[in-house]
């Protein structure tokens, strides 16, 4: 896994191989690589916790949305103890099955390939990432060119940061926006298709299905999303 992920940097022209060797701490995956990746995975939860705190701070300042998408200052209630208690209850409800799975059946969701004896001379015929990375993996392999695939992979994540700027609707909710609701479910279906394609071998017809689904993913967010928002504004005379 470390070799595959770090080798993505080798697609960068001129400095790619240098970046790979810098990430490895040598000319191959070795002890320095494991130390760096361990430190990275140790620090990431603290970064995520910090971002969560920032998110809650902004949420406390501006308030959350409601199904009608209208101002509700007169009906607001304190965050604590109402929402804090509700969030803690939801957190515990999610943590309990996760802890049970980790302690009693840690291999239940594991890849069967993990139980195959390691053999540096034989590569498994079908290697795939964990299920939550499959959609991005499908986009990565939908472009035959290595650099193009890496750029598409990065764009599939970075495009989500453009969504607030592509939001053209004057409403904050989708309750009265049937076209946006339809577009949302199209996007969800497309992500399921990409996840399914990512779990399949790189062969016909999965190649063409992945390419079409990848194209639909970018078209939905970059083109259809702002167009539908503007169209709904016109339909509702906003």
Image (spheres, rainbow, N blue to C red):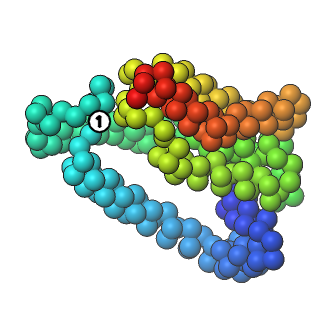
- Residue 162 lies, with reference to residue 96, above or below; the image says below
Tell me where residue 144 appears, x and y as whole percent.
86, 49
Label 1 crowd bin: few (<14), some (14–19), many (20+), radius 10 Å: few
Tell me where residue 42 appears, x and y as whole percent.
45, 65
Q: Secondary structure at mark 1?
A: loop
Left or right of residue 103: residue 204: right
Left or right of residue 126: residue 50: left
- Residue 59 lies, with reference to residue 196, above or below; the image says below
| The one of 169 and 130 positioned closer to us in this rendering | 169
Residue 86 in sight in this render: no
Tell me the residue that label 1 is attached to. 65
- Residue 219 lies, with reference to residue 2, above or below; the image says above
- Residue located at (65% from left, 55% from top): 154
Left or right of residue 89: residue 237: right
Tell me where residue 78 appears, x and y as whole percent.
11, 41
Count of numbered marks? 1
| The one of 43 and 62 positioned closer to us in this rendering | 62
- Residue located at (15% from left, 43% from top): 79
* Quarter in which the C terminus is drawn: top left
- Residue located at (77% from left, 32% from top): 212
- Residue located at (23% from left, 43% from top): 63
* Quarter in which the N terminus is drawn: bottom right
């Amino acid at each position: 896994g470390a070799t595959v992920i770090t080798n993505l940097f080798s697609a960068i022209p001129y400095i790619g191989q240098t970046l790979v060797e810098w990430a490895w701490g040598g000319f191959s995956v070795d002890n320095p690589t494991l130390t760096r990746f361990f430190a990275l995975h140790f620090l990431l939860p603290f970064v995520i916790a910090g971002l969560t705190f920032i998110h809650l701070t902004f949420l406390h300042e501006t308030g959350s949305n409601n199904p009608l998408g209208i101002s509700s200052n007169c009906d607001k209630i304190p965050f604590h103890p109402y929402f804090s208690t509700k969030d803690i209850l939801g957190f515990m409800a999610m943590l309990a099955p996760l802890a049970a799975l980790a302690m009693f059946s840690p291999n239940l969701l594991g890849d069967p390939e993990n139980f195959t004896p390691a053999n540096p001379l034989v590569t498994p015929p079908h290697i795939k990432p964990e299920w939550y990375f499959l959609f991005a993996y499908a986009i990565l392999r939908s472009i035959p060119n290595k650099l193009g695939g890496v750029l598409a992979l990065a764009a599939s994540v970075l495009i989500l940061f453009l969504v607030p700027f592509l939001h053209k609707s004057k409403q904050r909710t989708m309750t009265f926006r049937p076209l946006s609701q339809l577009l949302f479910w199209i996007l969800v279906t497309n992500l399921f298709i990409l996840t399914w394609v990512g779990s399949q071998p790189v062969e016909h017809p999965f190649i063409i299905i992945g390419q079409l689904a990848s194209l639909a993913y970018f078209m939905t967010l970059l083109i259809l999303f702002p167009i539908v928002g503007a169209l709904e504004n016109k339909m509702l005379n906003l």
